[in-house]
Image (spheres, rainbow, N blue to C red):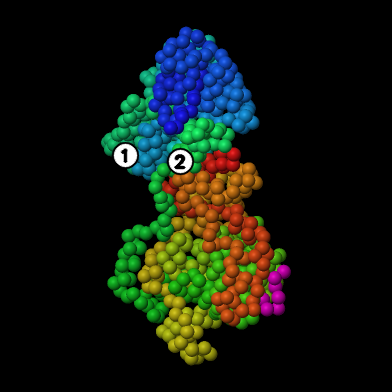
Amino acid sequence: MSVRKKAAVIGLGHQALEDHLPGLADSQFAQLAAVCDTDSSKVAAQAQQQHVPGFTNIRALLADVRPDFAIVAVPHDAGREVIKTCAAAGVHVMKEKPFATSPDEAAELVTLCDKAGIELMVTVQRRFHPVYIAAVQLLEQIGQPYLVEGRYTFHCLDPAAGWRGRASLAGGGALIDMGYHLVDLLIWYLGLPDRILADTSTAAHPDADYDAEDTALVHLTYDSGLYGSLLISRSAGPKTEQLTVTGPRGAVVIERGRVRRFAPDGQLIESLTREPAWPSAATAQIDCFCRVDHPHARGPEGVPAVTTSPLALLGGPPVIDAPGPHFAWPPIEDRDVEAVTGQLMSAVSIPDRSGAVAALEDSLASFLGVRHVVTTCTGTAALHSMYAAAGIGPGDEVIVPALTFHATATPLFHLGARPVLADVDTGGQLDLDDAARRITARTKAIVTVHLWGLPENMDALAAFSTRHSLMLLEDGSHAHGATWRRQQVGSFGRAAAFSLNGPKPLSAGEGGFVATDDTELYYRVLLHGQYNKRCRREIPADHALASYAVTGMGLKLRIHPLAAALAHAQLPRLKGYLAGRETVAARMRKALRGVPGIDVPHPPSHAGPAWYALPLRYRPDQLAGLPAERFLEAVHAEGADEVDLPGSTRALGDHPLLHTPGALLPGYADHQGPAADSFTTAQRVHGSTVKLPVWHRDQDLQLAEAYTAAIIKVAEYHKDLVK
């Protein structure tokens, strides 16, 4: 049989009677063990009613009862000393808002609680109330919000009465006392505003003696186009507590105990009501505080130890509760379905350059600004054909970045060539100093990879290849539409290979293509994987290799017509996709800039990324050594399931095929690749990369912000994961 945690309630004012005592009565994990107040009559009344001992001295309570945690509901200016006393006794604290009366006091209390090994949580938070939780689901139905209006008012007969009228005692007036709830909900639902303008007033009672504002008006602006205001007053009636969020598909009105969703014309669509409206929130928060084990507190056997961590992994509410998947690619519209079904009815095989294949290749050549494009069945096939057509063969060496997808290197084995790995810099791009050290008399080419859609420094690469008389080739599989100094990636080298695999910026479901301005190389790409009709019709009859047209090099690597039809339908929207991704990526990078443990990419102003993903650099040294896997586990618990660690795109030195290919490829029986630890930067960059999807629609901004909020939350509370 489990034993519930012992709780003491310190301060027997209105909040204790209305929230905390009823909340404890319904708790699964805690029970009231004592009450305390400086007013002996209140103590006597509640001790008798609750059947627990009563105290007027906190130290006596802590010594006699030894509670596991205390709920502190005292005047604002008294909270600091109560928390200090509890910390000295090793007693965890749930503190009635506000957390502190000044930033300096807040910093002092955080340090104090950390040193004492106790947890401190602000109560009662609206977000634990079932109605406010239900509002999250309704907010998803109204689209990207553009207007938020909050109002929390009631009429106080004498704002000068008691300690609340003095800013020095209360830490502020209506804004800190009442506005806390609206501000907390606003951040929970919509994230931090980008700009805030606030005005306060003490003019409601000109003849009264008080300096804590009775009214505050706060104006809010978000870069997403969301605007709003909050009115908080303890002098203006009637009593109202309401938050209204409006989007293109309607509005959600959140009140204490009720949430309603309206159509754009004001018609009520649905309404949810919870009665009684409040004690369940206090109970839910108390249970959350108790139910997750913490290294700090070791309770009786069978009893969850006290926790105040807001992390979902440790029992707190998640940032995102919408079911996944949260990212799907490519976006399929009616025109895509029509293109594919139309092709299905027309032809399921195109052996020459006609129909959907010709249309796609022409459009891609125009888009990239190159003379020739040849489509293939996969990106791997495109790389294979590019290398073969470039004349790379037995004994040749090609410099390949040590951090990429393996197919950048592995087709070279099938040509008798040798991939020579070169390390990358701390940004994951090719380290040209290391590449220079790898050059030998057999080095024929260098291939650059625009990893995650971020363009490589093509000025430096072009100069490097010229200086060392190397052929420059590009792997643009992540980077369709990316630019360097406004020139399309894939048009810098002698040739470029791209993938059209499912999640790529331009998708055919499966496919690839080679792009080049070199007509001779174009003919050889055809001969490598497009034998017979294409070769016979596109290679001039008087060409030296025309006699090989029927057989080519014996491989058939043609794209499927249905894949070509899909990619051709998608291509006109690619620039729009990328513009949307740039907007979202900028917002996400701005939100994460300066977050401990997270470094965001900073591409130069003349680079136009395709943002195949947003690669973040994880810095465990800034988060008390928290392993990336544990960090990711916590982020997933917050509902951000699409955040992940790179898998197949990794340090190539990890693959056995790059070390001892002879086990699979007999021609390489004597080949011995570099040691697995030869490319330390590639391994370090891969091991510290955490990547996010980059959405492209305006309506996805809220989800993108929720993902960054999940990362920020885990970074902020990382100590809860390493205690």
Q: Residue 650: x, y in percent?
A: 57, 61
Residue 151 in sight in this render: no
The answer to if 514 sits in the magenta stretch is no
Q: Residue 190: x, y in percent?
A: 45, 38
Is 528 rendered above or below residue 297?
below
Is 297 rendered above or below residue 437?
above
**Which residue is at 52% across, 82% downward?**
524
Q: Nearer the viewer, mark 1 or mark 2?
A: 2
Which quadrant does the N terminus fall into?
top left
Q: Residues within 10 Å of mark 1 (few under 14, many from 20)?
A: some
Q: Residue 469: x, y in percent?
A: 68, 75
Is 4 rendered above or below residue 359?
above
**Which residue is at 37% across, 40% downward?**
137
Q: Which residues are drawn in magenta?
A: 437-443
Amino acid type, callout 1:
Pro
Amino acid type, callout 2:
Pro
- Find disc 2 in the rendering and name its residue: 318
What predominant SS class does the magenta segment belong to?
loop
Which quadrant does the C terminus fall into?
top right
- Find disc 1 in the rendering and name its residue: 264
On screen, residue 562 versus residue 711, left or right, reads left
Of the image marks 1 and 2, the number of the one nearer the N terminus: 1
CB contact under 8 Å: marks 1 and 2: no
